[in-house]
Amino acid sequence: MKLQSLRRTALGTLAAASLVIGGAVSGHAADSPQPGAAAEPVLRDLAAAKGIYYGTAVTASKLNGTYGAVVGEQFDSITPGNEMKWESVEPTRGSYNWSGADAVVDYAEAHGQKVRGHTLVWHSQLPGWVSNGSWTADSLRTVMNDHIAAEAGRYKGRIDHWDVVNEPFNEDGTRRQSVFQTAIGDSYIADALRAARAADPTAKLYVNDYNVEGINAKSTALYNLVKSLKEQGVPIDGVGLQAHLILGQVPSTLQANIQRFADLGVDVAITELDIRMTVPPTSAQLTQQKAEYKAVTNACLAVARCEGVTVWGFTDSDSWIPDVFEGYGAATPYDENFQPKPAYYGIAEALGWSDGGTNPTGACAVTYTVQNQWNSGFTAQVTVKNTSTAAVNGWKLAWSWPAGQRVTQAWNATVTQSGTAVTAADAGYNAAIAPGATATFGFNGSWSGGNTAPTAFALNGTTCTA
Ligand code: G3I
């Protein structure tokens, strides 16, 4: 069955906003929306218009047919569920199998998606030669660094975020006694981050864990780790909150917790979201799950440094939950037949979609990202998306600095500043932005006191969503 007919089934009379043809995304409608009816949401477009990404974990071997079509159309970041883990890529020392990992990265590039690399150093899904080896600190550090150099090096420049270290803590905030912790000691995390930076200088480097979504002993240990790494100048760009949640138990401190990490000067991502419930689900449970997916997405949207959300499998037919938690399931936004569940619409609503037939995206959408920041300077990247149906030919993007920053040097645009008002004009070769396409430019700036991101942008005088 084609995706289009699946959507019709799911949505009744609602018309589709975009159509998957041969796995590629087409931004135009096959049918026009009925008057008064809403266009079906496309999560990746809605998320981009809000300045975040929406991702899913994937299984490489399934990236075809309806599964592949939904992944390509709805998500703008993908994480290999298993294919980049140590046992998958280096089952014997120095002997690599990249087939699954390559397939995921190739798929992402063909579909304009980010890749979240998962994961370089983890106590689980390790090959026996690592977990059962007899190691000194030096010998295991060498093995770990070699593994990171090989894997992060292979995908250098093609991975947006790396979960460099996964699940380093126990629930009480002490260090998990993994083979890395016991052989190398506390410093293995800093060693791994440095090795990852050396192997792929442009990937954002994350430490990722579960049960760290709310403020608790474990997330405070992670907080203290990040603080100390930053103080030592160890390369750490972000923290991943896995968010394997149970219906009715979304932590009330989620947003405050994201904010406290952001305030430390790192990015945050929700990396493995699912919300499990007892099965078979009741409609009341599915409605509650919708509200909770919405709340988690809203918590990310509320904090500027929250980069995006990844669901751990988008369909209940590709979820780890039933295998591990007996009697639980229905944890993802699509059911086992690829039908969107209420949770899917909860995400879409958090991202600004409404079923009242309004177009939430407007004419342009701007993503403003501080990529690097130091005591008095910073580097930022700005992506302007043309969300209208008309081509842009020649553009000026205007914004005003909220904290007195100054642009000192720009690329891919000509940037001028007067007082706090900034205008970035196209650089000629990127003057045309087709409907649905983007233009990206960057700059270095200076700041003092604060470096709050601008929130209002106008493209050729028209207000954009930011
Ligand atoms: O590939 C084999 C297959 O050949 C075999 O027939 C089958 C029989 O059990 O097992 C298959 O391997 C399974 C693998 O997933 C691929 O499906 C493993 O048994 C199974 O243990 C493994 O589970 C993965 C789990 O990590 C392992 O801890 C899940 O798919 C994966 O979603 C899950 O992901 C983790 C994150 O990496 C870290 N955070 C928690 C999250 C959930 O556990």
Image (spheres, rainbow, N blue to C red):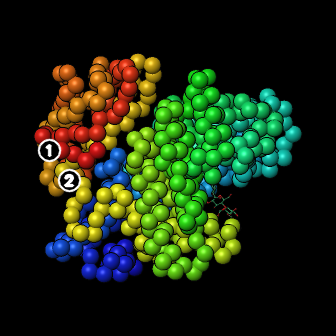
**Left or right: where 463 falls relative to 238:** left
Location of ligand 1 given as a quarter of the image:
bottom right
| Residue count near mark 2 (Cα–Cα under 10 Å), binned few <14, some 14–19, many ≥20 | some
Instruction: Kindly identify which numbered label has been placed on residue 362.
Output: 2
Kindly identify which residue carries mark 1: 462
Amino acid type, callout 2: Gly
Does the numbered disc 1 mark a residue whose Cβ is under 8 Å from ligand 1?
Answer: no
**Left or right: where 167 falls relative to 51:** right
**Left or right: where 293 falls relative to 119:** left
| Image quadrant where residue 191 sits | top right
Circles 2 and 1: CB distance less than 8 Å?
A: yes
Which x, y percent locates residue 281? 54, 78
Report the quarter where the N terminus lies: bottom left
| Image quadrant where residue 139 sits | top right
| Image quadrant where residue 246 sits | bottom right
Instruction: Kindly identify which numbered label has been placed on residue 200.
Output: none
Which x, y percent locates residue 73? 37, 61
- Above or below 319: residue 144: above
